[in-house]
Structures are given as structure tokens and as C-alpha cells.
Image (cartoon, rainbow, N blue to C red):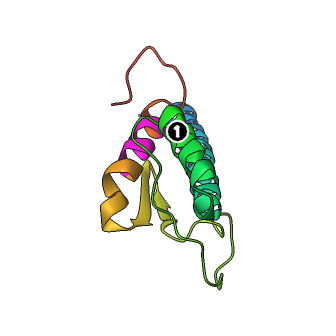
């Protein structure tokens, strides 16, 4: 096989690989945006719920809003006492993105919130875009 043929084959492989790798990177980024949006919305709802606890009528209204908006209910986010790390999730004290490697995301989550957070992450990652091939 000539050097020119090897170079041509290498370029063809790189072209196909770039398309696959780039598309996968786009999917994970969309999933991360969707996860952030969902977790931030839950945090804000729960924060409003905690603020309204002094007024039982307001508390009941908020609970109904949370139940209506989220079938599984809101996550139990606490208000942060301090924010030494800052970043995108500064308002979330109990769910933190830790690491992204290829098509995997790692979060720190309180044990009691794992099922709810896992369901959100799974839904957002599998539904990042509509494809003819399922991502699950």
C-alpha cells in the first residue's frame, strides 16, 4: 500500500470520526443544559415553598403547584448557608455537577434525592434530541 493511499484512508477515517464525536459532544451539551434548567426550576420552586411556610394557605397553594407541575414532587433542596464554590449551581446546595467524561455525567446528590435526580438526568440525556435511533 502506498503512502498516498494510507494518508487518504486516514483522512477518511478522521472525517467520519469527527462527525460522530462532534455529534456526541453536541448531544451531551444539550442534555447538560436541559438538566441544569430542570434542576434550577426545582430549586426555585422549593425555595418559594420554604419561604411561604409561615403562611399555611400559601404553603398549601405552593404544594398544589409543585404537585401539578411535577408528578414526582420537588427535590428537597436546602438554601445554601454559604457559597464558597460559586458557579452555575450556586443556588443548589444538594445537587452538584462534578464531572463530564465523554457521554457520562457525574453528580453529587443527597442519598434521598438519588431516584428523582437520576430520573431527571436519564430523561434529559435520552431526550436531548429526537432521533430515529433511541439513545436508551
* Chief SS of the magenta region: helix
Q: Nearer the viewer, residue 118 or 8?
A: 118
Can I make out residue 13 in this image?
Answer: no
- The residue tagged with tag 1: helix, strand or loop? helix
Question: In the picture provided, is 85 more to the left or to the right than 134?
Answer: right
Q: Nearer the viewer, residue 41 or 32?
A: 41
| Quarter of the rendering occupied by the N terminus | top left
Give coordinates of residue 85: x percent, y percent: 64, 81
Can I make out residue 121 in this image?
Answer: yes
| Quarter of the rendering occupied by the C terminus | top left
Q: According to the image, label 1 marks what residue?
A: 64
Q: Nearer the viewer, residue 72 or 56?
A: 56
Question: In the picture provided, is 44 more to the left or to the right than 110?
Answer: right
Q: Nearer the viewer, residue 76 or 105?
A: 76
What is the quadrant of residue 7 in the picture?
top right
Give coordinates of residue 126: x percent, y percent: 43, 33
Give coordinates of residue 13: x percent, y percent: 49, 34
Residue 39 vertical position relative to residue 80 in the rendered view, above or below: above
Residue 1 vertical position relative to residue 109 in the rendered view, above or below: above
State which region is magenta.
118-124
**Which residue corresponds to the image point at 65% horizontal and 63% vertical from the top-left?**
51
Amino acid at each position: 500500500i502506498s503512502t498516498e493511499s494510507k494518508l487518504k484512508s486516514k483522512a477518511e477515517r478522521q472525517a467520519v470520526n469527527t462527525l460522530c464525536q462532534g455529534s456526541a459532544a453536541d448531544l451531551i451539551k444539550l442534555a447538560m443544559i436541559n438538566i441544569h434548567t430542570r434542576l434550577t426550576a426545582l430549586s426555585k420552586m422549593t425555595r418559594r415553598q420554604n419561604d411561604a411556610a409561615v403562611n399555611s394557605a400559601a404553603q398549601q397553594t405552593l404544594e398544589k403547584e409543585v404537585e401539578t407541575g411535577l408528578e414526582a414532587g420537588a427535590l428537597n433542596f436546602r438554601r445554601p448557608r454559604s457559597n464558597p464554590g460559586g458557579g452555575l449551581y450556586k443556588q443548589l446546595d444538594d445537587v452538584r455537577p462534578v464531572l463530564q467524561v465523554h457521554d457520562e455525567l457525574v453528580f453529587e446528590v443527597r442519598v434521598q434525592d438519588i431516584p428523582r435526580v437520576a430520573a431527571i438526568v436519564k430523561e434529559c440525556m435520552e431526550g436531548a434530541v429526537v432521533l430515529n435511533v433511541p439513545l436508551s
